[in-house]
Image (cartoon, rainbow, N blue to C red):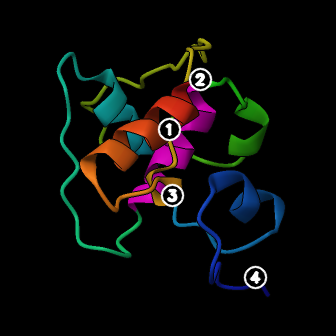
């Protein structure tokens, strides 16, 4: 029996640890296929970090993590929809951990972000 991923916030931890993962890769495919920015506005603890971690692994081309998920073997929900194929191109990813930033002042925040970018 698979366990719930309590305290696990990254896609690779959940997949490699054998935890329960609700496959949302079809929705992620739709988001990353849009030709415009997408704003994520969700309350705390609603899976934003896991979503971004999943997108990060898609963009890094880690297809092996997606075995058995929709994105690895996409199937249309209806017969009228074409089956999309994802080519797994590798994209550069910049990962900023905002939880590690010093937010005590604007100057401290700016410095923390500059250190992460460096």
- Left or right of 65? Residue 36 is left
Q: Position of residue 83 (x, y in %)?
A: 42, 25
What's the mark number on residue 50?
Answer: 3
10 Å crowding of disc 2: few (<14), some (14-19), many (20+): few
- Whichever of callouts 3 and 2 sits on the residue coming sooner in the sequence is 3
Q: Where does label 1 land, which residue? A: 55
- Whichever of callouts 4 and 3 sits on the residue coming sooner in the sequence is 4
Q: Where is residue 48 in the image (x, y as percent from the top left)?
A: 38, 58
Image-quadrant location for residue 9 = bottom right
The residue segment tinted magenta is: 48-59
What's the mark number on residue 118?
Answer: 2
Viewer-proximal residue among 23 and 48: 48
Q: Where is residue 104 in the image (x, y as percent from the top left)?
A: 34, 62
Q: Does the magenta stretch include residue 60?
A: no
Front disc: 4 or 3:
3
Q: Please name the residue shown 40% across and 33% down the image.
A: 29
- Distance in Å between CA atoms under marks 4 and 1: 23 Å
Q: Does the magenta stretch include residue 52?
A: yes
Q: Please name the residue shown 65% across and 78% down the image.
A: 5
Question: Is there any visible trace of residue 110 in the rendered image?
Answer: yes
10 Å crowding of disc 4: few (<14), some (14-19), many (20+): few
Query: For the residue labelled by badge 3, is the local secondary structure a helix, a strand or a loop?
Result: helix
Q: Where does label 4 land, which residue? A: 2
- Whichever of callouts 2 and 1 sits on the residue coming sooner in the sequence is 1
Are the residues tagged 2 and 1 within 8 Å (C-beta)?
no
């Amino acid at each position: 029996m698979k366990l719930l991923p309590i305290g696990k916030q990254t896609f690779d931890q959940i997949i490699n640890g054998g935890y329960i993962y609700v496959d949302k890769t079809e929705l992620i495919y739709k988001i990353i296929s849009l030709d415009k920015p997408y704003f994520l506005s969700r309350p705390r603890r609603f899976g934003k970090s896991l979503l971004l971690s999943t997108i990060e692994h898609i963009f890094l081309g880690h297809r092996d993590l997606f075995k058995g998920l929709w994105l690895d073997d996409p199937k249309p929900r209806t017969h009228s929809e074409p089956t999309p194929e994802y080519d797994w191109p590798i994209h550069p990813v910049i990962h900023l951990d905002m939880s590690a930033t010093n937010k005590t002042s604007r100057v401290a925040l700016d410095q923390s972000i500059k250190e992460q970018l460096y």
